[in-house]
Amino acid sequence: MFANAKNNGRFLLILFLIALTVSCASKEYRDLKKQIKQNPDDYAANLKLGLHAIKVRNKIDPYFYKGNQMSTDILFSKIKKAAYEAVSYFKKAIQIRPDAPEAHYALGNALAYKVRVATTKWKHIDPFGAISHVMIAVKLAERMGNFEVATKAKISLRGLFGLFKIYRPEDFAHIQIPGSSQPSYPVRPPQSQQPPQAVESAYSGTGFLFSAKDYV
């Protein structure tokens, strides 16, 4: 009985801390949502909403491993929702500004996050997309002279290759670096398809590229 009371007390404390976290961030969230409602193509608002979701996810994440099964399930659903919200907003930001290195860097790291897909099974959201977008961030940041983002992206890229050992740099040989009007979602091209000439290639050889019609 004492153990149950202790677990229930911990559960209530965790819920209180989550509510406090969400409450502190709610005004910022509401303001950003209002901005997007007024202008869905507001790049900065979409990027900030993605970063807001990451902030919420990271604040809740430590409590996920400390509660009982009931609190763990509740926390996981909140963490998963925040993780996918971040991905969604970062993708929207890239649709608005395909050549924004900050958005690609943020999306790459968001796609590397691991979520639970079954009671005991976990998976990273999109390892291939994670590496692809961080690679794009490196090239775009270097092109624009944004060496702070380029350095962060390079460090992140090394970490991703260490995490996802099934991939090697040559697997991403034809990742294309978009201009301001180019789509920026990496896809496997048909064998007969050649890389478009209007965009800069990150690497040379065979591998992956962007298509103006496809979406992954």
Image (spheres, rainbow, N blue to C red):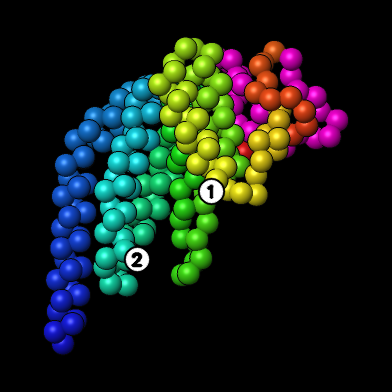
Asked if the magenta segment contains residue 186, the reply would be yes
Q: Residue at x 40, y 40 (%)?
A: 86
Depth order, front residue of 201/76: 201
Of marks 1 and 2, the one in the foreground: 1
Dot 2 alpha-carbon crowd within 10 angstroms: few under 14, some 14 to 19, many 20 or more: some
Q: In which quarter of the image is residue 15?
A: bottom left
Asked if the magenta segment contains residue 207, the reply would be no
Q: Residue at x 45, y 25 (%)?
A: 151
Residue, disc 2:
73
Q: Earlier in the sequence, mark 1 or mark 2?
A: 2
The prevailing secondary structure element of the residues shown in magenta is: loop
How far across and how far down the image is residue 110, in percent?
45, 41
Q: Give the vertical position of 42 relative to 57 (above or below).
A: above
Drawn side of residue 156 relative to residue 21, left or right? right
Determine which of the numbered discs, if any, sits on residue 151 in the image.
none
The amino acid at mark 2 is Asp
How far across and how far down the image is residue 85, in percent?
40, 42
Residue, disc 1:
163
Residue 21 is at least partly visible in this image? yes
Q: What stretch is highlighted in magenta?
A: 175-197
How far across and how far down the image is residue 184, in percent?
59, 27
Q: In which quarter of the image is residue 62?
A: bottom left
Q: Which residue is drawn at 27% across and 65% down?
A: 66
